[in-house]
Amino acid sequence: MRKQLQVWLPILLCFATVAASAQSFRVQCPTTTITHPSNLHNNNSEPAYSGPTVLTAPSNSTFQRPLSKVNGAIKCQQISGGDGYSTMGDGTQTYMFAFGPLSGLAKIASGDPRGGTDFPNEFNQVYSGPPLQPGEPATTDDPNGDGNTVPGDINLGAFPYNGAIGLIGDLQFDRTIGIFNITEAGAVATVRTFAAHGLSVGDPIIISGATPNGYNGSFTVASVINTTRFTYLPGV
């Protein structure tokens, strides 16, 4: 006969190193999409045209997708926007709204026809050079600021970064969430949380404040039942 123990707990479930991660900068360039799957083509390059792409919808989906040939590639560009009033020469104030690129800056400076548009492996590069200065890339490429094209005065290779300005890598974060209850059956503990836990199988967790004490400690998620229920092996 299987014994079931139900415990009502005013306790906290602490996620020490939850696998879910957050982006502090949300603009991302995908490496694969439905119409440009990476298994059919390297999306970091432009394929040579060899005929039209034939799209087909699988039986379990309404999305059209290529089965053998991909034309074009995934390209991304980050832009900034701003608005304000400018004063014309005759004193008239005019409202203006403008955009400016924040990716592919080295390519723009060197006259690359792609401009601020990047392939995923360019766009997703995290900047690791010296601190960026106002006016980049001209601040680095033309430190004298005179626009002189005399060799040695302007070095278009001094600023090589083409990724999205401000992009940083994934950040791991800790979270704390309340537990509604824990039930045990056959040495498997099922946790019900007050809010969505966001866990996946194998994620590390720390449980504290539970009674009996054997429920507390560091464990890994054994299974995910739904958004507010998961299981682990407490060893009690």
Image: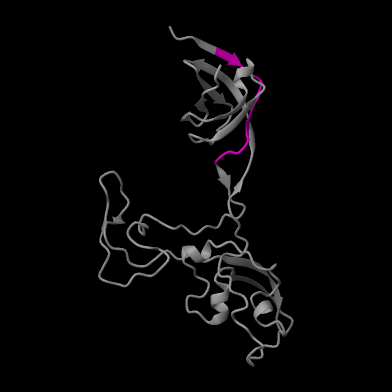
Indicate the quadrant where residue 8 lies.
top right
Between 87 and 136, the one nearer to me in the picture: 136
| Residue furthest right as drawn | 91
Relative height, residue 94 to residue 151 (above, below)? above
Q: Is residue 7 magenta?
A: yes
Instruction: Describe residue 178's horizontal placement relative to residue 53 as left or right.
Output: right
In this rendering, the answer to whether 70 lies above or below 22 is below
Q: Residue furthest front?
A: 235
Residue 174: x and y, percent? 64, 39
Report how many numbered discs are placed on residues in the image.
0
- Which residue occupies the foreground of this view, 83 or 40? 40
* Quadrant in which the C terminus appears: top right
Q: In the rendered view, would you say 109 is above or below 6?
A: below
Most distant residue in the top direction: 1
Task: Give 76 or 45, whichever is nearer the viewer.
Answer: 45
In this picture, which residue range is highlighted in magenta? 6-19
Q: Quadrant of residue 99?
A: bottom right
Please report the residue visible at 40 percent of the width from the left and 63 percent of the height from the top: 43
Query: Looking at the picture, how far across and down is residue 182, in whole percent?
Result: 56, 19
Q: Is residue 43 magenta?
A: no
- 112 to the left or right of 213: left
Q: Nearer the viewer, residue 102 or 206?
A: 206
Colouring convention used in this rendered image of the protein: one colour
Does 137 sit left or right of 70 as displayed? right
Q: Residue at x 31, y 48 (%)?
A: 62
x, y percentage for residue 185? 48, 15
The percent position of residue 205, horizontal first and vertical second, equals 58, 32
Q: Quadrant of the N terminus?
A: top left
